[in-house]
Image (cartoon, rainbow, N blue to C red):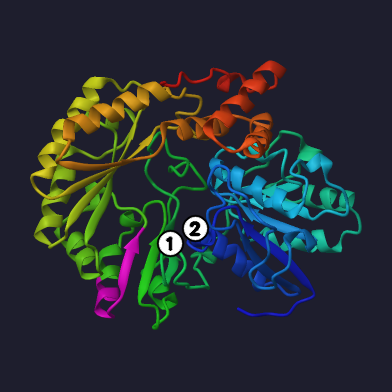
């Protein structure tokens, strides 16, 4: 999508290129800017390896123009989740741009933030963003850029943006967040204009099959109460947008397997020789026809969500997956010639005990006798704008004990991959925190970016008395 235009905007993603170009939201905003008269988007990413603790990031250059991001009038940044704030700090530091908005002057770029994090708790971004768009940004990015490039002063920019709906301007609104934007259904679906072999989803055409979710899982930001619930893209529209020369298609959404025509869509794409990946599969939707269609479009591993360690825990989360449904997934995957079943679940959920983990050991051991089994495990992190908002973190020691209990119980039978309990605690502090916790990320990153650096940064907030009340209790870390 090469284009010449009077105004070039730096569109940045605070993770490496492979992750950024696998983000359909990032690609959608890129397309929105490219389609607007007078504007062109130049992409920028965190350097490969730049998201690791202690990483040294050189000056950040845009992909299209090889210009430093500091040379642009406006930098738009999409932040997907809490831990990417560290990537934002590294990008700004490398570019010589003050991270704290209060330290930036008219000679510095205007920082306009958005992305999935705005659906839950963008408060940790208040100290970084000159402004941010809340929620679905497709219809707001154009008017926002018009104001930013027509206003003659920084004050005029801020005042102009503050008049738009669903845009938070911290210098004017303080900590009061704007409402979450929702676009008209006629503008769906989002689709990615760029395919690249260097993305995590290599050479895959990304396309929304639906947006939102009709389910009520208590831990999920995108549950049915968010932005009108599930909005379905018609089958004909989905198929009409897929390029003939795209060998692989990624159907994206919070509840793709709930699309009423999903099996038909998969079979029609299989007839055209396409490989297809779906971003979410629910075990209660997996029947013979569905799994057969998945096999036809190239699935070798059937991946779905178990969520809780026991049936009691799943019920407490308003998660409908039952053992018999998950067992059916295992048997169907084997019958259709797949190699493996992969289940995602959380540990450390509210009310969970060792007996729930024992049930998980028993059940997953039974599943492993049907088909090779992998578990992808994440510690539970409570999010804002969910019924479990405000729930405490289970504790690093507790999560590590539960993980060890699982590993011992299924050793040699089930493959387990888990995310770090320590970094889950950092994510929880940010998910439940505010501006002070967000700005403390900069201190932690500059000190080296290790877990110990984050712990020290948050302890410093305690001493200053500026930390959010809910996040004040430091974790007990196993020696």
Q: Are marks 2 and 1 in contact (CB under 8 Å)?
A: yes
Residue 460 at what x, y percent from top left? 67, 22
Q: Which residue is mark 2?
A: 19
Mark nearer the N terminus (2 vs 1): 2
Furthest residue in direction right, as rendered:
152
Q: Quadrant of residue 210?
A: bottom left
In what element is the residue under mark 1?
loop
Image position of 262 (left or right of 43): left
Q: Which mark is residue 4?
A: none
Q: Which residues are magenta?
A: 267-278
* Inter-mark Cα distance, 2 to 1: 6 Å
Number of marks in picture: 2
Q: Quadrant of residue 302?
A: bottom left
User: Is residue 178 in sight in this rendering?
Assistant: yes
Is 24 colored magenta in this rendering? no
Q: Which mark is residue 200?
A: 1
Image position of 331 (left or right of 47): left
Furthest residue in direction bottom, as rendered:
244
Which one is in front, 162 or 374?
Answer: 374
Q: At 35% from the left edge and 57% from the top edge, which residue is drawn?
A: 256
Q: Residues within 10 Å of mark 1 (few under 14, many from 20)?
A: some
Q: At 45% from the left edge and 28% from the top edge, which residue is drawn?
A: 388
**427 versus 472 height, above or below:** below
């Amino acid at each position: 999508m090469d284009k010449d235009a009077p105004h070039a905007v730096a569109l940045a993603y605070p993770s490496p290129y492979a992750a950024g170009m696998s983000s359909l939201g990032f690609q959608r905003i890129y397309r929105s800017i490219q389609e607007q008269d007078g504007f062109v988007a130049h992409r920028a990413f965190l350097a490969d390896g730049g998201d690791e603790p202690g990483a040294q990031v050189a000056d950040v250059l845009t992909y299209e123009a090889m210009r430093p991001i500091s040379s642009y009038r406006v930098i738009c940044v999409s932040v997907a989740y809490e831990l990417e704030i560290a990537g934002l700090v590294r990008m700004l530091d490398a570019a010589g741009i003050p991270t704290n908005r209060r330290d930036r002057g008219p000679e510095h770029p205007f920082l306009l933030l958005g992305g999935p994090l705005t659906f839950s708790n963008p408060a940790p971004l208040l100290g970084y963003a000159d402004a941010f768009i809340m929620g679905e940004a497709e219809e707001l990015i154009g008017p926002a850029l018009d104001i930013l490039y027509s206003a003659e002063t920084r004050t005029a920019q801020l005042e102009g943006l503050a008049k738009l709906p669903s845009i938070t301007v911290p210098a004017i609104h303080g900590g009061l967040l704007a409402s979450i934007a929702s676009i008209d259904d006629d503008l769906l679906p989002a689709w990615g204009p760029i395919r690249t072999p260097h993305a995590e989803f290599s050479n895959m055409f990304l396309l929304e099959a639906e947006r939102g979710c009709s389910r009520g899982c208590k831990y999920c930001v995108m549950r049915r109460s968010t932005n009108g619930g599930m909005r379905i893209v018609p089958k004909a529209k989905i198929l009409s947008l897929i390029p003939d020369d795209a060998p692989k298609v990624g159907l994206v959404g919070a509840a793709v397997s709930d699309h009423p025509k999903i099996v038909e869509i998969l079979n029609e794409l299989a007839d055209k020789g396409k490989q297809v990946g779906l971003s979410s599969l629910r075990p209660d939707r997996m029947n013979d026809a569905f799994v057969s269609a998945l096999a036809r479009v190239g699935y070798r591993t059937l991946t779905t969500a178990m969520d809780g360690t026991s049936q009691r825990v799943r019920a407490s989360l308003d998660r409908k997956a039952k053992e018999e449904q998950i067992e059916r997934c295992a048997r169907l995957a084997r019958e259709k010639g797949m190699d493996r079943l992969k289940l995602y679940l959380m540990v450390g959920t509210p009310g969970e005990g060792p007996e729930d983990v024992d049930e998980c050991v028993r059940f997953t051991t039974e599943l492993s006798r049907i088909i090779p089994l992998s578990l992808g495990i994440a510690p539970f992190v409570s999010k804002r704008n969910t019924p479990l908002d405000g729930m405490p973190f289970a504790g690093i020691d507790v999560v590590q004990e539960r993980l060890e209990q699982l590993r011992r119980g299924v050793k040699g039978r089930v493959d387990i991959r888990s995310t770090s309990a320590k970094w889950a605690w950092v994510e929880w502090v940010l998910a439940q925190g505010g501006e002070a916790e967000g700005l403390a990320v900069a201190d932690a990153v500059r000190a080296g970016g290790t877990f110990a650096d984050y712990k020290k940064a948050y302890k410093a907030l305690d001493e200053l008395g500026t930390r959010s009340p809910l996040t004040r209790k430091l974790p007990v870390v196993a020696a």
